[in-house]
Amino acid sequence: MKPDAWYKGTVSLARENIELTFNVPHDVFSTLQIDEGTLALLDHLPTSKPSLILDMGCGYGALGLPVAALNMEAEVHMVDRDLLAVEWAGRNAENNVLANTEIYGSLGFRDLRHGKRLFDWILCNVPARIGDRFIEDLFVSGNALLASGGEIRVVVIRDLGPTVEKIGEENKLPIELIHRGPRHIVYALKKSGVAKASADADSQRLYQRDRISVGGVEFDRPYDISGDSIRVEKALPILIDGMPKREQGDVLCVRSSYGILPILSRVRWPGSRVKTFDRDLLATTFTRENAARLDLMNPQLEIEDAVDLHLYAANKKTRFDLITVEVSASVGRAVVEDELALVMELLKPGAQALLLCGDRLAKEVLEPFAKRKKVSLYTLITRNSMSLLRMS
């Protein structure tokens, strides 16, 4: 991928005596401006002097980097389950010369690198669709990770206010309302004696939304997978209908989500070698869990964490008989075109890629790309304003 293919724009922030600039990629949270929830939390930070801080769900750094700039003597751990966000948060830390940060991927508290140290602050702009169990764990297990005198401080949309307050009551945690704005509420929890011994990393318990059936196979589905209902009901059936009947050799499913396409490929073609990746640690976690439940976790199914196709394919020698790609307009034209070019390089001679996208994206990006690159592009199915195209 070209170094700047993901770049969408730049946003700035001025607070107290600091001025920061953030380069923002496509397809992450709040790309046009710093969202109101983050600003509300920045305006209502704890007043204690911290030495170790955790920013849970850091995105491209709009919360954690200003906190790091305001607390230069503190060590700020910034984590996100989206590896693309992590990469750009790291770039922004470097560009703003904030060396007091540790930025890495983590699914909730699962992959923290703080050792046995305890946090003085745990901060989080809580995702609106993450589910009640995660929010409960943020307070309950987060409380166990606080140092004496430490504090959790979160911002939520107003609709989640009753959920947070119910969690406080049910767990006997003194969660305090700090600020109520037009659309967001800031809550605080100071270190409480009521605490579990350690953070719970059971992803199925914390994130599972439901179990659904696709193509005759049942999948555990997590909360907070963007646009998933439309994808399952309208988009994926088109791609599944267009998949080859005969067994494939080496198959690459670009982006795993929670495993539908790679697992259906293994079920449909038992002799195939299927590889997949995703930049979302929640997605790959559920892909692995679904595969394990179906007894498909074996060398014929390879699941990796990677920011994008370029980084996944780097230094790999495998070429594929079939590549499936759900092409998204949200990643930007440059990323789409770079990805398509790399797909062509990864195909064996005479092999094919199946590309699923909206009709408009097909006409405005995929068809001009194929014409320019002189590759074969054929429309197999059009339905529900979606197109399935075969590229070879």
Image: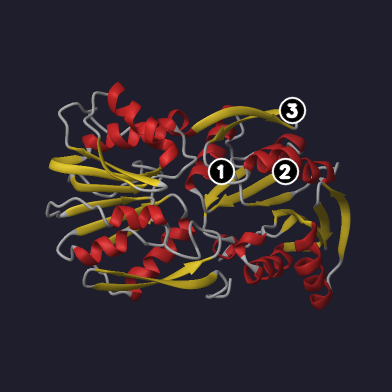
Find numbered disc 2 in the image and state the secondary structure of the residue it sits on. loop
Provide the residue designation for mark 2.
Answer: 272
**152 in relation to 338, above or below:** above
The structure residue drawn at horizontal position 29% and vertical position 35%, both measured from the top left corner, is: 139
Distance (Cα) linking label 2 and label 3? 19 Å
Find numbered disc 3 in the image and state the secondary structure of the residue it sits on. loop
Q: Viewer-proximal residue, 376 or 175?
A: 175
Mark 2 or 1, which is nearer the eye?
Answer: 1
Provide the residue designation for mark 3.
Answer: 216
Provide the residue designation for mark 1.
Answer: 225
* Amino acid tagged 1: Ile
Who comes first in sequence, dot 2 or dot 1? Answer: 1
User: Is residue 306 toward the left or the right of residue 182 in the image?
Assistant: right
**Can you tell which mark lies on residue 8?**
none
Q: Viewer-proximal residue, 222 or 322?
A: 222
The structure residue drawn at horizontal position 44% and vertical position 45%, both measured from the top left corner, is: 127
* Amino acid tagged 2: Ser
- Looking at the image, can residue 300 be seen? no
Mark 2 or 3, which is nearer the eye?
Answer: 3
Q: Residues within 10 Å of mark 1 (few under 14, many from 20)?
A: some
The image quadrant of residue 12 is: bottom left
